[in-house]
Image (cartoon, coloured by chain):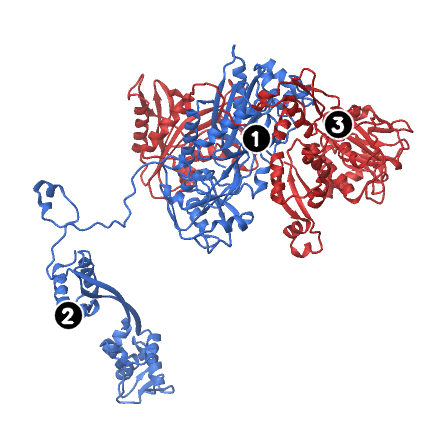
Amino acid sequence: MPTVSVKRDLLFHALGRTYTDEEFDELCFEFGLELDEITSEKDIISREQGDTKAEGASDVILYKIDVPANRYDLLCLEGLVRGLQVFKMEAPRYRRVSPASSEPQRLVITKETTAVRPHAVAAVLRNITFTQERYDSFIELQEKLHQNVCRKRTLVAIGTHDLDTISGPFTYTAKPPGDIRFKPLNQAKEYTAQELMSLYKTDSHLRHYLHIIEDEAVYPVIYDSNGIVLSMPPIINGDHSKISLNTKNVFIECTATDLTKAKIVLDMMVTMFCEYFCFLLWENILEPTGQYVHSDYPHSICNPQPFFGISESTEHIAQLLTKMCLRSEVMSDGEQIEVEIPPTRSDVIHACDIMEDAAMAYGFNNIPRTTPRTYTIANQLPLNKLSELLRQDLAAAGFTEALTFALCSQEDIADKLLKNISETRACRISNPKTAEFQVARTTLLSGLLKTVAANRKMPLPLRLFEISDVVLKDESKDVGARNNRRLCAVYYNKSPGFEVIHGLMDRVMQLLEIKPGQGNGYHIQAADDSTFFPGRCAEIFACGKSIGRLGVLHPDVINRFELTMPCSALDIDIEHFL
Amino acid sequence: MADTGLVETLLRRVEKVDGGLDSQDVATSLGVDHQAIVGAVKSLLALGDVISAEQRSSKHWELTGEGCEIAEQGSHEARVVSSIPEEGMPQSQLMKLAFGKVGFSKAMSNKWIRLDKGHEGGPRIFKTVEHLEDLVRDKLLLVQKGQASQLEEKEKNELKKRKLLSEVTVKSYWITKGSCFSTTITKQETELTPEMIASGSWKEKKFKPYNFEALGVAPDCGHLHPLMKVRTQFRQIFLEMGFTEMPTNNFIESSFWNFDSLFQPQQHPARDQHDTFFLSDPAQAHEFPQDYLERVRKVHSEGGFGSQGYKYDWKIEEAQKNILRTHTTAVSARMLYKLAQQEKFTPVKYFSIDRVFRNETLDATHLAEFHQIEGVVADYGLTLGDLMGILHQFFNKLGITKLRFKPAYNPYTEPSMEVFSYHEGTVLLKIFKPWHVSCLCEMCVLALSHSNPKAHRRRNPIHTEYIFCFFLHNFVTVLSHHYKVKVESHASSETQPNQAALLLTQHTSKPGSQPHQCVGGNTVHLATWSGCTAPGSPQESLVASTLDNCATREAHTEAILICPFLLTPGLKKWVEVGNSGMFRPEMLLPMGLPEGVTVIAWGLSLER
């Protein structure tokens, strides 16, 4: 969840009233936001860098508010206010306007861009007046959008420019890095694109974005009609066209690998700030974002009541939606509502999104709770039922249940058990953060032995078991792997206790109603297994099938798990008994 | 039983005196070892009120081995003098004597002897006194006779420095007559025997009283893992509510079923390498229902089914990538798809409790795998009110009665709600009652979910993790099968509660630890904090001041199984307990479920 920090007093001023912290927290809860922290710049600095550094820092109270990941329109003060004012404010209507005196601006996209960053959309905000706060908020919003919907500029990058320093039509193209040369934002001299990439290698902020285009043959670049570089997206703007507090007309460009997201981002940049700027001019340039993607998007909803579980009149629901900035009218049939989705609400893509807003306006907690009349008969999964029954009886047989990780290192299931990894059929993880999670386990034994090692100080003997899944590669499954339910037990004591673990196996068979003997019964016969001490391992057969092994562990296995006592183990596949 | 003769002698002595007597004196006068008297006293005490004995301790001086030798044979210096003949003796010869070295220097400083260095045949020693007073020996003899009090402290300390004397503490009993005093004693039987029952002799016998303060012998039995016990209880609740168990025995899942089928876009952050375990072998899934896959592609990239879609270039390559499932909702998706393939739709209620995986580095607040609990209901015309109603019933069975809902965002449910429950005070959940109630009562649990935002913020909302911290309060006996841990008090040092935890889980403090590995253990976040209050009413101060700063640490104790639910006295707070929502039509309709069928679902995590 993104966090937005706003000055409390500014927020209250914009909301037109003050709240106590508790009241505001409650308001947030109802709206699905979370008042995460109440702090100040001074607090933050003193916490991060110590009290001395914090001296002189502002102690204006800041609210840090968590907003849902899909509500890009709540990422700045302006949007939050509009959102939270639901209960009193009339939804603003956004209109696209053409400049009175001149032709609309144009952005020409050349085909070279397809190789690197194929999409661009742009708009112009005209006749605006920045104050310091608005300016800060404008910059902050860009940054928030970059971090969230833009996925750290990979999907979309935003550039804002002082329109009066440049002249259209603009060209979005792509060129070899050596051919791009301009003075970047806040630098004193001109650099080529190559030089810039090495310059920003050490920049704490920009270095994170270099990888997006670094290895491309051509870099994206935007020029004005006089050949002035506006920006080299997604890295840096030119210094020439930078905006300031005195900027009157802002040219906004969004370059992207995802056109839908570019439009959403441009819509946000424009709509969030238009309320300050009475003579908004929003021009479409080439890519027609300004069609008000959503504005003439009526939604018909048949009979919204069943959704809620309450009977509210259609009129009332329309009113609720209007309060949520979704201008709504009941249609002539009296049952359907026509809803106008403003460009700020890119999250609304289906009727269900509208209904959620209605439910929020009504208050989730005001909806009566009902019990569904759905009649069903419950069934247990046979495999889990079997596991549950066996667990109880193994505990009654004096063994203690352990719970171990399903992921482990390759060493755990191979080297430490004196096995070759290639014979384990293990599934491998490509991106583990630590060596602890290289593979999915193919046996429960290593987890149990680690558990023994962690409990060496406990009185002997240690008797442990686990019934759980291992994962094996299996070509016959759609994903190429399957789980396998195993029962594993270990006995750790001064003597190996083969007879104890053997006795446990006999008990398991007795519980499963399998009698000793060949054919339909069970029996064990000597087997070779590198994990076990030579001559002390047997294979278990039940109903003619091999179901697992038991035996005394090899001393090298015991050593590799940092154990010191003899240990016997039982490992069987219980899926045979379903 | 101590020697009967000694016991009776002792009783007679006690009878003769009026006030009482000291066991040490009795030992001296009888000429027996003091320990024998102590044994006699203890066996008399065990008979009831025959005598009463009060323990005393006194200090007295005793000769060391060397001291005894001196008391017997004289001090080293005196022996030096007496061993020198009139004509003197060579120094080298003197030094060969056992007492030579020490005695020589002492005798020199006492001026009892003189050394002629220039004597022919080497240095020679001569006596200078004929009679001497061996003060050291005299003093030691005084001590030996028990008259140490006649010596001055200074003298005693000097002898102590020479290691001739030592001060010893003697414990003795002051023995007086008890209310049932008698000089004759009857032997008491300890246990009933088969012979006594057969002969009836038990009727005449007196039996030794039991010590009911002692602990019994621990039964020799196995145990179920506490977390698994909780799982069983949850399973039971679902079964009682008519829910059928889903087959979740497939840890490896394709991105298609884990994400795409749930209408989770391919650029969604949850699909990043940072959050999800991808597989390199088997790297890809190779089999999908083709027509369904096509409908999924369409709804993502173009929209349809009443939706505008996400309008991006949906790639089959992304969907094929195998992962370790990040939620059991992947299984719900498979089940709902299967349901949609039925000829005629039938309403269903499904549940599952199984492992899910997140690409995390293990630390105090993160596990790479945990158990997700999920419930799903599909029927015609289910409403938001139904979802809240069924959640109410579900949590009611856990003993949580007050719920409220907060709007939330989740890519595959709309609306999505976080479920909050109000922690009233100390409430023991019904399902935990069978176990270890005594320790649960002593224990309080603090929900940290609000004070450690970083830990849960980035999670997928369907199972936002809860971080609970434990606080072992006062004398808590953590009753685990193998463990008996006593925590005296948490307060004074930061390490103390930890020690308790670490007794069980030393391995957790090491990198690469395995929190699940403790026998019968469970993962818990035991908080350690400074500035705790004294035992009594620590909760308020903890809540108020220390949660933000407390370092959390994992521990494994049986007691933690209460973690998600045991409610702290004083924690009157709404705490998030789960997530819920109605599946989006973009997820259900491409599967082929009929229009009008709604699916409600909720999830929570077993351990967090």
Quadrant for the N terminus of chain B, please.
bottom left
Are both tags, 1 and 2, on one chain? no
Are both tags, 3 and 2, on one chain? no
The image's mark for residue A366 is 1
Q: Is residue B528 above or below residue A260?
A: below
Where is residue B177 drawn, in percent x and y?
17, 64
The local secondary structure at tag 1 comes to: helix
Q: What colour denotes chain A?
A: red
Q: Determine which quarter of the picture holds residue B254.
A: top right
Q: Nearer the viewer, mark 3 or mark 1?
A: 1
In 3D space, how far apart are the residues under numbered discs 3 and 1 (Cα atoms)?
36 Å
Chain blue in the figure, letter: B
Q: Is residue A560 visible in the rendered structure shown here?
A: no
Nearest the viewer among B449 and B556 is B449
The image's mark for residue B17 is 2
- Badge 3, how many Cα within 10 Å: few under 14, some, many 20+? many
- Badge 2, how many Cα within 10 Å: few under 14, some, many 20+? few
Which residue is denoted by mark 3 in the rendering?
A263
Q: Determine which quarter of the picture holds residue B579.
A: top right
Amino acid type of the residue that numbered disc 2 sits on in the rendered structure: Val
Amino acid type of the residue that numbered disc 3 sits on in the rendered structure: Lys
In 3D space, how far apart are the residues under numbered discs 3 and 2 (Cα atoms)?
108 Å
Left-right relation of B198 to A39: left
**Mark 2 belongs to chain:** B
Label 3–label 2 contact, CB within 8 A:
no
Nearest the viewer among B73 and B339 is B339
The local secondary structure at tag 2 comes to: loop
Are both tags, 3 and 1, on one chain? yes
Amino acid type of the residue that numbered disc 1 sits on in the rendered structure: Asn
